Image: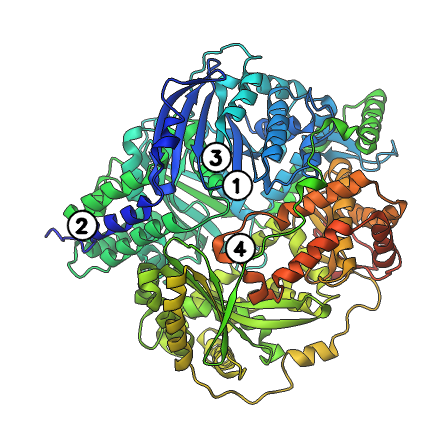
Amino acid sequence: MLRRSGLNIHRTRQVIQRFLSGSTPDRAILSKYPIGLNLHGFEITETTPIPEFSLVAVGLQHPSGGKHLHLHAENDTNNVFSVAFKTNPPDSTGVPHILEHTTLCGSEKYPVRDPFFKMTNRSLSNFMNAMTGHDYTFYPFATTNAQDFNNLLDVYLSSVFEPRLNYNDFLQEGWRLEHEDVNDINSKITFKGVVYNEMKGQYSNSAYYFYIKFLESIYPQLHNSGGDPKNITDLNYEDLIEFHSKNYHPSNARSFTYGNLPLEGHLRKLNDFYTRFGKRSKSLDIKQPIFTQTNNKSFDIVAPGPIDAMSGKEPSSQYNSSITWNLGNPLDENMKYEVFKWKILGSLLFDGHNSPLYQELIESGYGEDFSPNSGVDITTSLFSLTVGLNFLTKEQAANLESKVVDIIKSKVLPELESPESNYDDRVQAIVHQIELNFKKHKANFGFGLLNAIVPSWVNGLDPIKQLQVDQTLTKFKEDYSQNGLNIFKDLINDTLLNPETKKFKFTMEPREDFPKVIAEEESTRLDLKTKSLEPEDVKTIYDRNLKLAEEQVKEQDTDVLPTLTMDDIPKRGEFYPLQNISINEKTVSERVVDTNGLVYTYALKSINNLPIKYHKYLPLFTNCLTNLAGTVSTPITDLETKINMKTGGISFNYRITPNPYNTSDFKLGFSISGLALKKDAKHVYDLWYEIITQTKLEAEEDVLDKLSVLIKNMAQNQINNIADRGHSYASGVSSSKLSPSKYVSDLTNGLTQIQFVSELNSNLESRGEEFLTSELLPILQEIQQHILYGEPEGFKYRLVGDAEIVKENELLLQDFDSKLAKNSLPSTNEGLDSLLSSWKGLTASEKTLVNLPYQVGYSSLAKQGANYASKDGAALQVLSQLYTFKHLHSKIRESNGAYGGGLNYDGLSGILNYYSYRDPNPVKSIETFTESFDYGLKGWTDADLQQAKLRIFQSVDAPINVSSQGSSVFFDGISDELRQERRENFLSVNSNDLVDAAQKYLVDSDINSITIIGDNDALKVGDDWKVRELKA
C-alpha cells in the first residue's frame, strides 16, 4: 500500500519563502557580475543567486586554466579566501602533506623561515591554516579586516606559487636522520621530522588506524596522503620538488572568496601570479575504488591492528569489522539527488535511539559502538554505505554481513511498509533540522561552505550546483509527498539487497604485541638506513643537522612581511546591550536582536551544594537525561523524535565557572539550553520540564539496558581520545594540582574522568545489573534531587531573540519556572564550600608520567598565574604569546621535531601551561620549558608587543554567533565592562610589565606541576617521577 506522507510541502515552502524573501539578492548585486565580463584576466562564466544562503555565486575562468568561485555575501564581514589543488598522492610517503608544510616555510617574495607562522602575529585573522585531504590540498584563511585580507592573500599566493622549498625545510618538516644529541656525534642516530612525528601520533590512534587501513584497502589507488611513517622515510627531496611543479599550477587551482569585500581586488592579485605561468592542459586524474578494478562482486580483507588496553576486554573480543556496499559514483552530476536521499536514509538507519542498526547492533550487545567508517560516505568517486562495529569476537565479525542483512529484512523493510511507521515522523524531523539550519547564524559560515564544496570541486563537480540545496530539498519533498517511505524501500532493494551490488568486508584482527611490532619495524628501518653509513656519512649528517639547528635559532628579518599595527585594533570592544527583568523573583537576561525567527533560551542553576563525591558522576548524569529510557510519560524513541521535530535541539550540562577575581574560587552550575522556531518555543520548555523532573532512573529493565549501553559507549575509544588531545589531558593533570577549578575539571573531563568511566565499565562487566541497581542508580537519583531541590534560589534565565520573540518567551519561562517545586534540600557541609575551604595545591614540584603505549608523547609544565581581572593576568596572556612565537616554536617544533608546542595561558583559571604535542622526546621538552623561564627577562621591543597583541585580539575580536552575544556575563560573570577593562589592560601592557610578570610567575615561582603522557618502555623516566597507569 502506498503511504502518503504527512509532510506539509506547501507549509514548508511558505516557511522557506518567507525566510528568503527578506534576503534574496537584489538586482543591483546581480548586475555587478554580468556573464562574459572580464575582470583582470578572469571571465565570468556564471552568476547565480543562492537565496537559501543569502548569496550570489559567481563562477570565473582564467586563461591559464584556473577556476575561481566568489560567493558575494553582502552582510557578512568575515571574509574567506582559499586556494585548493588536486593532489593525488603517488604513494604513501606523505608528499602532499609534507609539501603543504614546506610551502609555508618561505617564498621568493617573503624569504623568511616560516612566514605562515609569523603572519599569525601580524594579522587579526580568525582562521589561518592549510589542510591535506585524500586527494586535495587547500590553504584557507578568514578575517574581517580588509587590509589584513590583502596582506594574507599576498603571503598565501606567494607561498603556494613561488615557495623556496629549501632542502633544510624538507628535513625539518618531512623527515631526517639526526643524532639524539645534535651536539654529540657519538650519540645514537634517530628519525626526526614534524610530519613524521605527527603521523606517528595519528597512527597511535586505533580509530584512525582502522579507518586509514580500510581506506587503503577499498581504495588502493588513493594512497595515504598524510603519509605512513614506515613510508615517509622513503621520500626524497627531489620527489617533493617534482610534486610541486606538477600540481601547484594555476590550471590545477581552484580559488575561492567569500564575503562582502570587492571581488575585483582579489582577482587582480590572483592574476598577478597566474600570468607568470603558461597555459597547461589539465585532464582530471580521478582515482577509482577497488570496485571498478575487477569484476569481483565481493572482497574480504583482514589486517592486524592494536588492542585497547583500557577496555578491560580480552583480545579475542576486540575484532573490529565492517561491511561496505558500493552505491555508485558521486561525481556523476545525476547522482546529486540520490546522494541526498541516501543521507536521509543513513540518518534513519544509524542516528539516535530510534535507528534500527543502533537498536539491533549496539543496544542488543552484538557490538559496543559503530566503527569510524560507518555511515553514508563520499570519498572522491566512491559513494558507499558502511556498517561496522568495534569489539567483536571472531565469530561475530564473520557473521556481521548476514546480521546486518537480517536487520534490513526483518526490521527496516517492514517499518517502511507499515502504515503505522514512526519513520514518517523521523523524516519530517530530519527535514525540519535542514530547514532550521538555513536560519541559524554562524560566524564561520563562509568557511563551512568552503569545506563542503572543495572535495568534489577539485574532482570536477560544479560547486554552484552543490550549493543549491533548496532545489534538492524541494524535489525531495515533492517526491516524498507522492511516494512516501517507498523512496527508501526502493533504495534498499536496488542496492543493499541486490545481489549484483558489490560489497567490501574489512576486518582488523587484534594483536597484543602490535605496539612492539610497530616499534621493531621502526628500529629495523632505522638500522637499514644507518648500518651502511660510513664515518664520513655520519659526519655529513652531523654537520648538516648542526647547520639546520643554527638556522632554526637564527634571527629572521621579518620586516619584509606585511603587518597590521596597533592602530588596527579598536580601542573599544563590542558591547551587547542587555535588559534584565524579573520573573517569579528570578533574573532573566534578555538580548534583543534579529535572530531570523529563532529563539535561543537558557537556564542556569547553582549546584554548589552537590556533595563532592558526586562531581565525577556529572558527565554520566547529564548524558542520562537524553540517553536513557526516556521519561515517565514518553519513551526515549518518541522523546528523541519530538525534540528533533519541534526544536533545533536541547541540551543539559554542568558548568565549572572560575571566579574572574579569584583563582582559588569557582562555581558549579547546571545549565539547560534550547533552540526553536518562534512558533515552536513552547515545546522547548515543556521538554525541559519533562526531562529534568521525569527522567526514569528506577531499576526497571529498559533503564538498566540503556544505562549499560551508555556506560559502554562512554568507555569506548578513551585511549584514542587521549591520543588526539594528549597535550590537553597532560595539561589537565598538571593544572589539577594547582587550582580547585582545574581539579574538578580533571575529575569531570580529564584523565581522572577517563579512569573513572573505565572503572564504571569494569564494574558493569564484573557485577552486571546488580552494580547498576544497588550502587549507580541511587547515586543518579540523588544527583537529580540536588539538581531540582539543592539550591533554594532556583534557575536564572537568558533569552535571545527579536522583541516579539523575547516578549512571548517571557510568559513561557514564567510558566516553566512556576511549575518547578519550590522546596529545597537542607544544606550540607559536603558541597563545594568544603572543597574550597580545604583545598591545598602543590607545595613542591611534582613530576608524573601517565604510562600509555603511544609512539609519541605529550608534555605539560604548569604554573600558577593571576586572576582574569588583574593587570598581571593580561601581562601573562601577552607573555605566553611571546614565549611561544619568539622561542618555544623553534625549540619544540623545529628543533625537537614535535608537531606542536608552546606556552598557553588560561585567563579564567589563571594557569600557565607549557605543552608539547606528538613529541618524540617529551622529557627533553620539559627541560626546554624549565630553561626558558628567564627568557622573558631580557625585555621586549615595541614590535614584539604589537605582534603578541595582534595574536591575542584575533580571538578576542573573532566574530561570534548571535546566540552568544552577551552570554559571558550570564555564564561566567564577565560583563561587557569587565571585558573592556581587560581589553584596555592588554593594550596598555608594556615591556616592564612583561619582565615583572616573567620574574614573578616564572622565575621566582618554584612550584612546577609536570606531566608527560607516553610509553615508559621508551622514555624510561627516573625514580623522581610518579608513574600513573591507566587501565580498566
Q: Are marks 2 and 4 in contact (CB under 8 Å)?
A: no
Image height of 500 relative to 873, above or below: above
Q: How far separated are the C-alphas under marks 1 and 2?
A: 41 Å
Dot 4, crowdedness within 10 Å: few (<14), some or many (≥20)?
Answer: some
The residue that mark 4 highlights is: 717
- Which residue is label 2 attached to? 484
Q: What amino acid is labelled 4 in the image?
A: Asn
The nearer-to-camera label among 4 and 3 is 3
Asked if residue 16 can be seen in this view, the reply is yes
Q: Amino acid at mark 1?
A: Asn
Horizontally, is 532 left or right of 669 in the view? right
Q: Residues within 10 Å of mark 1 (few under 14, many from 20)?
A: many
Answer with mark 4 or mark 3, whichever residue precedes in sequence: 3
* Closer-to-camera residue (72/857): 72
Mark 2 residue type: Gly
Is the residue marked by circle 2 packed among few (<14), some (14-19), or many (20+) residues within 10 Å?
many
Residue 78 circle label: 1
Q: Earlier in the sequence, mark 1 or mark 2?
A: 1
Which residue is farthest left? 1
- The residue carrying mark 3 is 258
* For discs 2 and 4, the disc positioned in front in the rendered view: 2
Viewer-nearest of discs 1 and 2: 1
Q: CA distance from mark 4 to mark 3?
A: 38 Å
* Spatial separation of the CA atoms under disc 2 and disc 4: 38 Å
Sequence-first tag of 2 and 4: 2
Q: How is the image coloured?
A: rainbow
Tell me residue 597's x, y (percent).
36, 56
What kind of element bears circle 4? loop
Tell me the amino acid under the disc marked 3. Answer: Tyr
